[in-house]
């Protein structure tokens, strides 16, 4: 919601811009974030959750 309110969807943003936004307000970070060994799983889509479960149980 903040993304659209700030008009960010109309701008071309780079990596530094995204880092600043995440540090400015936590809602710019998609959650949950799961870090497992050398893997990172971001978000709660069905595919991401299933892949994370497989990594945890293997």
Image: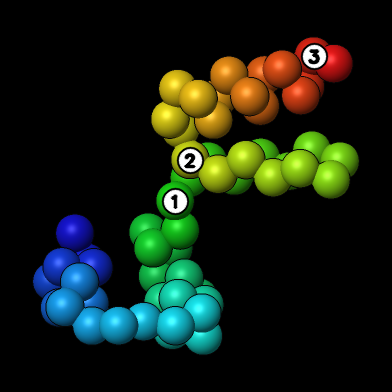
Q: Earlier in the sequence, mark 3 or mark 1?
A: 1
Colour convention: rainbow
Residue 7 placed where, x, y %?
15, 78
Residue 5 found in image quarter: bottom left
* Number of marks in the rendered image: 3
Callout 1: helix, strand or loop?
A: loop
Question: In the rendered structure, are the residues bearing label 1 and label 2 in contact, judged by CB atoms less than 8 Å apart?
Answer: yes
Q: Is residue 45 visible?
A: yes
Q: Earlier in the sequence, mark 2 or mark 3?
A: 2
Vertical comparison of 47 with 32: above or below = above
Left or right of 13 on screen, residue 15:
right
Callout 3: helix, strand or loop?
A: helix
Residue at image location 51% in from the left, 79% down from the top: 15
Residue at image location 76% in from the left, 43% down from the top: 39
Q: Earlier in the sequence, mark 1 or mark 2?
A: 1
Question: In the rendered structure, are the residues bearing label 2 and label 3 in contact, judged by CB atoms less than 8 Å apart?
Answer: no
Mark 2 and mark 3: span between their CA atoms?
Answer: 19 Å
Residue 43 bears which disc, if any? 2
Mark 3 and mark 1: span between their CA atoms?
Answer: 24 Å
Residue 57 bears which disc, if any? 3
The answer to which of 34 and 12 lies nearer the viewer is 12
Vertical comparison of 48 with 6: above or below = above
């Amino acid at each position: 919601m903040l993304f659209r309110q700030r008009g960010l969807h109309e701008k071309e943003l780079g990596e530094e811009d995204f880092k600043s936004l995440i540090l400015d307000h936590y809602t710019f970070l998609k959650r949950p974030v799961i870090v497992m060994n050398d893997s990172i799983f971001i978000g709660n889509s069905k595919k991401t959750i299933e892949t994370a479960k497989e990594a945890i149980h293997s």
